[in-house]
């Protein structure tokens, strides 16, 4: 499954201009989970990430290319939660390497399952709100959590812990971005591209003729490694 490899590489190139800090995963460092969605009222809020006109980006990419990621880790570009003095721009990007998840339907199901993991993580005092456009996310962080030392390291570890419950997952990289100078517009475009690739995969799986000359998915197929091969392998079944 190489469909998202191009986005992974391009994201890394985009962020290479900023200096990041990396923490290797340690399960014991995960932030406590509230077990369900928490409502943090504005009066209890210390910070908003991606709110009030700030950039808010999220996307995740799944790959079977284990060379792209060899350990579980959290990477932060920009100030950590305790250092932010005001609401901030925000991006949360996830790369996941998996064992062979098969082709076509099986791969699509696996990707969707991994995508839904984000709706089952509830770091205490870290209220995530998906925006209608599915590559955007805002976060409200409670004062209490900030007082207790919540950080991107601990929240990132919570994500990794949850992803690791899926036996197909090999490694996870959680990337948080709060650097005011980060290229949020370009990251958002990558997020949209991820959505486009997943939607194209879904369209292919619904069944369509392999007539590339008349196909409206041709631009994305020409660009995304593995998409064309996937459709033709699907067609042979
Ligand atoms: S391989 Fe790509 S361009 Fe060709 S028909 Fe299939 S989806 Fe369309």
Image (spheres, grey):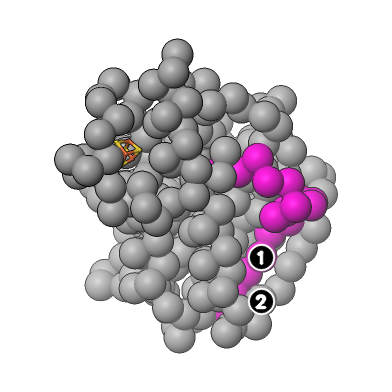
Q: Which residues are magenta?
A: 62-83
Q: Nearer the viewer, residue 149 or 119?
A: 119
Q: Position of residue 120 (x, y in %)?
A: 51, 32
Question: What residue is at 50 percent from the left and 43 percent from the top?
Answer: 226
Question: What residue is at 75 percent from the left and 52 percent from the top?
Answer: 67
Mark 2 crowdedness (10 Å alpha carbons): few <14, some 14-19, many ≥20: some
Question: What residue is at 36 percent from the left and 47 percent from the top?
Answer: 221
Q: Nearer the viewer, residue 154 or 165?
A: 165
Give the residue number, with chain letter if any, for mark 1: 75
Q: Nearer the viewer, residue 121 or 136?
A: 136
- Can the viewer see residue 205? yes
Give the residue number, with chain letter if any, for mark 2: 20
Mark 1 crowdedness (10 Å alpha carbons): few <14, some 14-19, many ≥20: many
Q: Position of residue 232 (x, y in %)?
A: 42, 29
Q: Regarding ligand 1, which quadrant of the image does it lie in?
A: top left
Q: Position of residue 4 (x, y in %)?
A: 50, 49
Q: Quadrant of residue 74?
A: bottom right
Distance Cα–Cα, label 1 vs label 2 = 6 Å
């Amino acid at each position: 499954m190489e469909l998202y490899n191009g986005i992974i590489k391009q994201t890394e190139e985009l962020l290479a201009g900023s200096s990041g800090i990396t923490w290797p995963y340690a399960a014991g460092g995960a932030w406590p989970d509230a077990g369900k969605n928490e409502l943090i009222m504005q009066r209890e809020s210390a910070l908003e990430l991606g709110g009030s006109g700030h950039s808010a980006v999220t996307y995740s990419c799944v790959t079977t290319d284990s060379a792209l990621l060899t350990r579980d880790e959290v990477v932060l570009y920009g100030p950590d939660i305790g250092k932010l003095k005001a609401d901030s721009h925000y991006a949360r990007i996830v790369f996941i390497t998996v064992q062979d998840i098969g082709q076509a339907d099986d791969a699509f199901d696996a990707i969707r399952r991994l995508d839904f993991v984000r709706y089952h993580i509830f770091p205490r005092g870290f209220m995530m709100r998906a925006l209608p456009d599915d590559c955007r996310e805002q976060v409200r962080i409670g004062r209490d959590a900030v007082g207790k030392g919540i950080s991107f390291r601990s929240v990132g570890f919570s994500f990794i812990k949850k992803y690791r419950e899926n036996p197909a997952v090999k490694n996870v990289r959680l990337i948080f971005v709060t650097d005011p100078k980060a290229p949020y517009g370009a990251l958002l475009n990558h997020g949209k591209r991820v959505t486009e690739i997943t939607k194209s995969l879904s369209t292919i799986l619904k069944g369509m003729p392999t007539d590339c000359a008349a196909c409206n998915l041709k631009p994305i197929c020409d660009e995304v490694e593995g998409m064309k091969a996937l459709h033709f392998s699907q067609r042979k079944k």
